[in-house]
Amino acid sequence: MQLKSLQDAELKGKKILARFDFNVPLTKTEPRTITDASRIDLAIPTIRFLLEKGVSKITLISHLGRPDGTVNPKYSLEPVAKYVAQKLGIDVILSESAIDNGVKNLLQLPETKIVLLENIRFLPGEEKNDMELAEKLSQYGDIYVNDAFGAAHRKHASVYAINNFFKNRAYPGLLMKKEIDSLTSLMDKPAKPFIAVIGGAKVADKIKTIERMMVMVDTLLIGGAMAYPFLKAKGVTIGNSLCSDEDVSLAKHILSQDKGGKIQLPKDHVVAETLEGLPEVCIGQNIPSGKMALDIGPETLRSYGEHLKTAKTIFWNGPMGLFESKNFAKGTMGIAKIIAGNEKCFSVVGGGDSVAAVMASGEADKFSHVSTGGGASLEFIEKGELPGVQALKGL
């Protein structure tokens, strides 16, 4: 069953209840400000579209952080309200609570166009998929719009249960539609060669994604801390590099399934004694004792680059090293530039850290699609569906 299109909805004069993923990183000290607003920036076109179509009111729902069903001022959406207002050039009123009686009063004021409900996860009913909470929220809108792809893998009240109260009146936002369309084309009919780049920290976190990719791709390039359990499983010495016994066991299992030799592992590394230590290139796969690998080396970057330049489809999830430090960012930034330079391929990047890396590289606009959902994009690849999307379809 296909998702409906927001462009086909009768929106003029309607009250809209819209779920977004404004779960953005904030500074740890007061006044708390947003350090990376890309998730909000990517959602702004949906809000603008609704305003242009002449809706009467928009009530925005989002979570931020993990307050675990209790009110915690450090997870307040106040910085988000200020940022959205600044981007749109109109007032955005932040409610005291998501189901505060004052919300209805706010929505009756002629001068109030947009209300942002305070963090929905301040309410224990959200993560319990509580039907009563969903019903209370539903009273704020004639039409429900879900643009929170990053939360679509959750069976939460504002993502899942709420669809029960908007039969034939629930639509994906513009970003949600683009996410689903892009990931579907990646999975259904990828042009060959199809190459996946998988990085990050733990094999255990991405075992299902790796197994799914093994079936689909022509080549699987592994980097970051993800690579060291694979190298250790092959008898390579990895020094003090991040690695758990569980991950080594999983890596052995995956390598045993790789009959076609699809998996490529780093040929050299950038190492240091500590995370703050001076970087040095370690030639060859073996890492000396007392050193830890914190980035792929120049030979690996060259070799991976040769593969990526031939690709017609690329999926990238996870950085190649500790890219937050300039000393260990060359591998990740190099991969970003190589993928961006392959203009003939359909390229998708998914996952929080890899998205942050692509944004930092300045190459984001050259990717076919930059996914806002880390866990959601991986789950969609593993299962081909998400609870929040199924609910939106009325399934």
Image (spheres, rainbow, N blue to C red):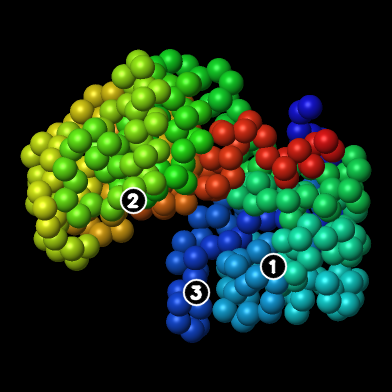
260 lies above or below 295: above
187 lies above or below 153: above
Provide the residue designation for mark 2: 244
Q: Nearer the viewer, mark 3 or mark 1?
A: 1
Seen at 68% across and 51% down, the residue is 154
Seen at 28% across and 23% down, the residue is 307
233 lies above or below 240: above
User: Looking at the picture, which amino acid does disc 3 mark?
Assistant: Thr
Helix, strand or loop at disc 2? loop
User: Looking at the picture, which amino acid does disc 1 mark?
Assistant: Arg
Q: Earlier in the sequence, mark 3 or mark 1?
A: 3
Q: Earlier in the sequence, mark 1 or mark 2?
A: 1
User: Looking at the picture, which amino acid does disc 2 mark?
Assistant: Ser
> Left of 182 or right of it: where is 336?
left
- Say the numbered circle drawn on residue 121: 1
- Report the quarter where the C terminus lies: top right
Dot 2 alpha-carbon crowd within 10 angstroms: few under 14, some 14 to 19, many 20 or more? few
User: Residue 240, how many percent across, how many down?
Assistant: 20, 55
User: Residue 10, how many percent across, how many down?
Assistant: 88, 42
Q: CA distance from mark 3 to mark 1?
A: 20 Å
User: Residue 150, how many percent across, how many down?
Assistant: 60, 50
Q: Could one spot residue 55 in this view of the protein?
A: no
Q: Nearer the viewer, residue 260 or 247?
A: 247
